Amino acid sequence: MAFLLSCCILAHNMTIFSDIGRYLLMLKGMFSKPENGKMYWKEFIHQCTEIGFGSLGIVAIISVFIGAVSTIQTAYQLVTPLIPKSTIAQIVRDTVILEFAPTLVSIVLAGVAGSRIASELGNMRVSEQIDALEIMGINTKTYLILPKIVAALLMIPLLVVMAMALGIWGGRLAGVASGIISGSVFDKGLLEFFVPYNVIFALIKAYVYSFIIASIPAFYGYYVKGGALEIGRASTKAVVVSCILILFSDYILSALLL
Amino acid sequence: MIEVKNIKKSFGDKVVIENVSAVMKAGQCNLIIGSSGSGKTVLQKCMVGLFEPDEGDVLYDGKNFTTMKGEEKTEIRKEIGMLFQGSALFDSLNVQENVMFPLSMFTKDTYKKKLDRVNEVLARVNLVDANKKFPSELSGGMKKRVALARAVVLNPKYLFCDEPNSGLDPLTSLVIDKLIKEITIEYNITTVINTHDMNSVMEIGNYILYMYMGNKEWEGTNKEIIFSKNQRLNEFIFASDFLKDAKEMRMLEETGKIPNDRNMDDLLDKT
């Protein structure tokens, strides 16, 4: 029984190592001279639109509500009158900037943009569109994957910055609407003990997450084998692995940079 | 001309094709036939470089494609057009954009010039007024014709077709076969077709390679196939009574004789 279990663990680890190897080879294979810069630029702009504008709505809604809930829950826990009300704004600001905007938004984007990338590439693989590009003499890794990663590296940090602003605004809105805190006190609290490094730290996280959000689903989509069922599985796996890697890198980056 | 020399390809322990050699001539329709799992798709994928053969060489006009690297291989690939079984049209692009794609990627022509060329090839495959349609709006036959137009838009020297008639009705199959044949002759292309379609075999097969369980079982022309004594080939090609009768009628026309075991009166009664 123990032997069987060891074999299973070994086989699983071998798959992980082989996946990591193929993932690194895929990244290496992306860097080649584009056949036609104009076509790559067009694809990059298309991906910016898909990843950036395509996720704008969901990011805005989540950010506003996360900020609002943060304000209400912080106020609920601050029961002592010794702590000034402006502290609520400080806590909301720092929570949104440090954690909610980069991490939570990225987890949502792993679902929205990540599954789209995996299923798009998976469908292209299964319907032989990738083979058709290969036969034309196009480096499919460069043409299909690189623009997605570069677009994610550009658009996701912008979405995170937008999420920071909307989260704080949502917190203020909820605080004022529920009578927990006045607008002027909230604004005053926002400016108190502000550490600009927190924004830089959030952006570093956003860049790392962007890379994960684009490259992991691209890997699972690009190497899919089979049919519609496998595309679905690859898409789910891509989202799950991306989320785990986002949380793991969140911990590592916090431990290293804070 | 494409020359295949002693190709072997295996996946894991399973040898899929072994020691296959063939010469595919320019200006001809070269057919690879065989039952499902006989290795014809793997052979074609080895020829276009989608699979790397374990052993053997593929030569394009004398240049060894198997040993080529990077840029050199890309140059050969630019001379290859391929019509896939499922057409492989890009879903997000309309007909015009699909056909224009290779032109945009590999030429510096003006938009007007590219559009003229797109319209020319679309007209060549009898597809007019479909420029703005998306692949999801096209029938199977139309998709194949768009894919054929995309495959030939850069004037390739080599054209590969994987099951060009699969999923098509007999009449549309005939149209596609006729188109491939005409384009092959018109542009002097070396065309390699994987097919199960017996009509294609008889109508357009200038050279036929029959694969059986990963090996070359028979090769010849569409004239020779009628008189072939290869049992496996005959079982594959003339599987139904109808086709057996058709074969014998053709033999009767050509030689005035039919096989000894058949009664001529029976055959003539049927026809």
Image: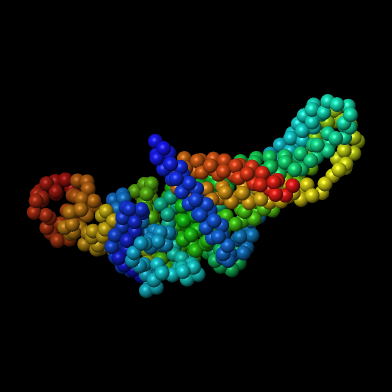
Q: At x 53% / y 42%, what residue is drawn?
A: A237
Q: Residue at x 70, y 49 (%)?
A: A256
Quarter that holds the N terminus of chain B: bottom left
Q: Is residue A121 above or below residue B153?
A: above
Q: Residue at x 14, y 61 (%)?
A: B255
Residue A113 falls left or right of residue B70:
right
Picture layout, residue B118 above or below residue A192: below
Q: Nearer the viewer, residue B145 or B43?
A: B43
Q: How is the image coloured?
A: rainbow
Going 72% across and 41% down the picture, which residue do you hit? A99
Residue situated in front as seen by the camera: B142 or A145: A145
Locate residue B205, reporting x and y percent: 30, 60
Can residue A48 be spotted in the picture? no
Judged left or right of residue A122, residue A69 is: right
Marker count (numbered): 0
B236 left or right, relative to B76: left
Q: Position of residue A191 (x, y in %)?
A: 88, 42
Please, is residue A94 above or below residue A72 in the view?
below
The answer to which of A140 and A9 lies nearer the viewer is A9
Q: Nearer the viewer, residue B209 or A59?
A: A59
In the figure, residue B126 lies in which quadrant? Answer: bottom left
The residue lying furthest to the bottom in this view is B62
Q: Is residue A67 visible to the viewer in this orientation of the structure?
A: yes
